[in-house]
Image (tube, rainbow, N blue to C red):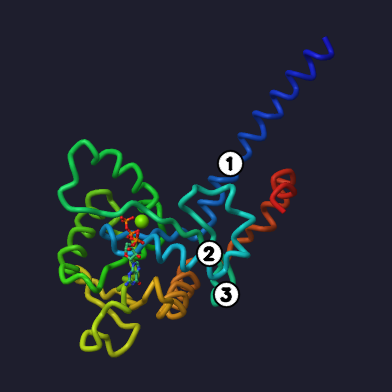
Amino acid sequence: MIAESIKRTKERLHKVKRQRQTQRRQRERRDAFNISLVGYTNAGKSTLFNALVKARAYAADQLFATLDTTTRQLYLGEAGRSVSLSDTVGFIRDLPHGLIDAFQATLQEAVDADLLLHVVDAANPNFPEQIAEVQRVLGEIGADHIPQVLVFNKLDALGPERRPPQLQDVYELDGVATPRVFVSARGGEGLAQLRQVLAERVIASAPTAPEAVEMTADFPDNHASSF
Ligand SMILES: Nc1nc2c(ncn2[C@@H]2O[C@H](COP(=O)(O)OP(=O)(O)OP(=O)(O)O)[C@@H](O)[C@H]2O)c(=O)[nH]1
Ligand SMILES: [Mg+2]
């Protein structure tokens, strides 16, 4: 009887732990400032994701386990806090019909974002059409109201005659004046400016959430196992 009781208690404990983990994940999403990388396929989203996250990977490690595989914490020193950065699937024209549902499901991350980092392959002569296509899909999934920062990537691949006079300016995107930063995700140029622009956005739109305090108070078990 005692063995049976221990077993049942253990099962209950396991269930409670799982529920708490789910709750914590939801809370993290709600409290965090969520940034999603979106853009046409091959624009360099994943390369940029890695470049940004690696820069401060030390701060991120502890929270990785509780987030999706494509989401990482990104510490923005200029804003004094972390944000949550998600890589997403690349947009592409004329997606086969059978794939549209699966594609849109994976883009749910983008719909929930506070800010979209719209990555563009600036070295591709078709970039204006690609931007238009991404805008169209964002409209379709209901993410066209989310503020954007445009990242014109592959700066290193632009000839000297196409190099912009400054790395940071404003681009008119469907009638909206949108901050734009030129970067080379591969070489690292412009990433400091991008972090600065992101930090300004975070400071402007979200009060600092007392995440650490809340986690300690509500989830001592998870907290302890994370460090
Ligand atoms: N020259 C140059 N190439 C880059 C740069 N960033 C990414 N690339 C290359 O562009 C290609 C696509 O990069 P990814 O990061 O996989 O692009 P993505 O947007 O994640 O692509 P999907 O996942 O297919 O949507 C790779 O060959 C990268 O090495 C850059 O700054 N300069
Ligand atoms: Mg990718």
Q: Label 3 is placed on what type of residue?
A: Gly
Indicate which disc residue 77 carries. 3
Residues at discs 2 and 1 in contact (Cβ within 8 Å) = no
Q: Quadrant for ligand 1? A: bottom left
Taking the spot 36% from the left edge, 47% from the top edge, the residue there is 108
Q: Are marks 3 and 1 in contact (CB under 8 Å)?
A: no
Which image quarter holds the C terminus? bottom right
Q: Position of residue 102 (x, y in %)?
A: 30, 39
Instruction: Please report whichever mark, 2 or 1, sits nearer to the chain's N-terminal start.
Output: 1
> Residue 100 appears at what percent x and percent y?
23, 41
**Mark 1 lies on residue:** 23
Question: Mark 3 CB in 8 Å range of ligand 1?
Answer: no
Counting from the top left corner in percent of width and height, residue 89 is at 33, 51
Q: Amino acid at mark 1?
A: Gln
Q: For the N terminus, which image quadrant?
A: top right
Label 3 – label 2 distance at C-alpha:
9 Å
Tell me the crowding category of disc 1: few under 14, some 14 to 19, or many 20 or more residues within 10 angstroms, Cα based.
Answer: few
Q: Secondary structure at mark 2?
A: strand
* Beta carbon at label 1 within 8 Å of ligand 2: no
Q: Residues within 10 Å of mark 2 (few under 14, many from 20)?
A: many
Q: Nearer the viewer, residue 125 or 110?
A: 125
Looking at the rendered structure, the secondary structure element under dot 3 is loop
Q: Which residue is mark 2?
A: 74
Q: Is residue 226 above or below residue 173?
A: above
Query: Which is nearer the eye, 11 or 176?
Result: 11
Per the model, the C-alpha gap separating discs 2 and 1 is 21 Å
Residue at image coords 15%, 64%: 129
Q: Nearer the viewer, residue 172 or 98?
A: 98
Residue at 28% x, 90% y: name it: 165
